[in-house]
Image (spheres, rainbow, N blue to C red):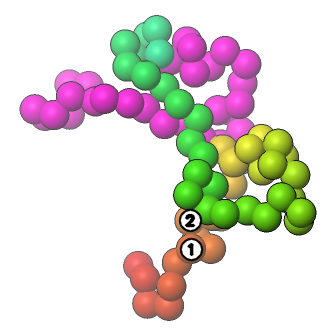
Amino acid sequence: MASVGEEPIEKVYISGGCARLKGLPEVLETRLQVPVELLNPFRQIEVPEKLFDPEYVRDIGPLVTIAVGLALRRKGDR
């Protein structure tokens, strides 16, 4: 937080396999004194419930953030 500058950190998003460790968001919230939330890359993506179980999609969200980001890229994106 010392290198943030003048803008305060308002929220922390966590992702990856360790993000799903039981109690991790709460521990980070307590230590950092800011809200902590699991990153959900499917938040604004329509996922057909007939093809994918919504609970499964929610569970794997934090694990696939990079893959989803890469899949959303267009030719020429950097």
Which residue occupies 74% across, 44% down?
Answer: 58
Which quadrant of the figure contains the N terminus?
top left
Q: Is residue 3 magenta?
A: yes
Q: Position of residue 21 (x, y in %)?
A: 72, 24
Residue lying farthest to the left in this orientation:
6
Give the class, few, some or many, for how many residues have Cα within 10 Å of label 1's Cα (few <14, many ≥20): few
Residue lying farthest to the top in this orientation:
30
Over which residues does the magenta segment extend?
A: 1-28
Which residue occupies 69% across, 48% down?
Answer: 61
Direction from residue 9 to residue 19 in the image, left or right: right
Quarter of the image where one finds residue 55: top right
| Residue 3 visible at all | no
Which quadrant of the figure contains the C terminus?
bottom left
CB contact under 8 Å: marks 1 and 2: yes
Task: Work out whether 53 lies above or below 73.
Answer: above
Q: Which mark is residue 72?
A: 1
Q: Which mark is residue 31?
A: none
The amino acid sitting under disc 1 is Leu
Task: Work out whether 40 lies above or below 45.
Answer: above
Residue at the disc numbered 2: 69
Q: Position of residue 36 (x, y in %)?
A: 48, 25
* Helix, strand or loop under label 1: loop
The amino acid sitting under disc 2 is Gly
